[in-house]
Image (spheres, grey):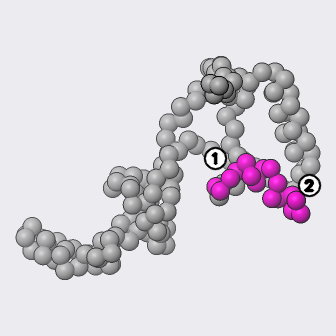
Amino acid sequence: MTNPTDGPIHGWFELTYSNYLVLHRTLMQSMPIEWQECMVACLQELREAYRHIEQPEAFKVEAATVHEVSDLNKRQRAQLGITEDWYRGATPPEGWSDEDLAEWRLHHEDPDGPRYYRDGQEIDAGERVLLPAADPIPHYRHSYVEPRPPETPAA
């Protein structure tokens, strides 16, 4: 290996673009003591090796689910600040009959489908976004989650 950034950690992240690894305290505290001791030693070594680099004061981490923009419903898009434009910037007239509006839409609707915008920038319909979700793992103060060894395939 010529570059340490192409090593085992890079491989562990596989093809994701993740820049962080989030570990659940509840699950780590539920692991055997020997495992916890090894983990703490690795974390301490990492902390010491980069003490000279400015670190963020805090992080905001929340559970989420992954969705493509085009799969979001109106409420979900609004929650994420994403707008949908079917009419290439035009706005349907107000006060028209349903029949007139249907004809207007027929003539103005983009045949390529809607365009999506977030923070004033166009985003791709296939872009993956995160919707906040409930965390299925209980808070560490209230739970022990028994670890299970990986199942071995039947011979």
| Disc marking residue 52 | 2
Q: Is residue 127 visible?
A: yes
Residue drawn at (62%, 44%) of the image: 61
**Amino acid residing under circle 1:** Lys
Q: Is residue 115 above or below residue 71?
A: below
Q: Position of residue 121 (x, y in %)?
A: 49, 72
Secondary element under disc 1, as helix, strand or loop, is: loop
| Disc marking residue 117 | none
Mark 1 to mark 2: distance in Å? 23 Å
Q: Position of residue 15 (x, y in %)?
A: 65, 56
Residue drawn at (70%, 51%) of the image: 13
**Amino acid residing under circle 2:** His
Q: Nearer the viewer, residue 95 or 125?
A: 125
Q: Residue furthest front?
A: 155
For the N terminus, give its image quadrant: bottom right
Q: Is residue 8 magenta?
A: yes
Do the numbered discs 1 and 2 sit on residues whose CB atoms are within 8 Å? no
Q: Is residue 151 visible?
A: no
**Mark found first going from the N terminus, 1 or 2:** 2
Location of residue 85 (image quadrant)? bottom left
Q: Position of residue 132 (x, y in %)?
A: 50, 45
Left or right: where does residue 25 sit relative to residue 132?
Answer: right
* Disc 2 packing (10 Å; few <14; some 14–19; many ≥20): few
Residue drawn at (78%, 21%) of the image: 32
Q: Which residue is mark 1?
A: 60
* Disc 1 packing (10 Å; few <14; some 14–19; many ≥20): few
Q: Position of residue 71 (x, y in %)?
A: 38, 56
* The magenta segment: 1-16
For the C terminus, give its image quadrant: top right
Q: Is residue 6 magenta?
A: yes
Left or right: where does residue 132 sit relative to residue 15?
Answer: left
Residue drawn at (38%, 71%) of the image: 115
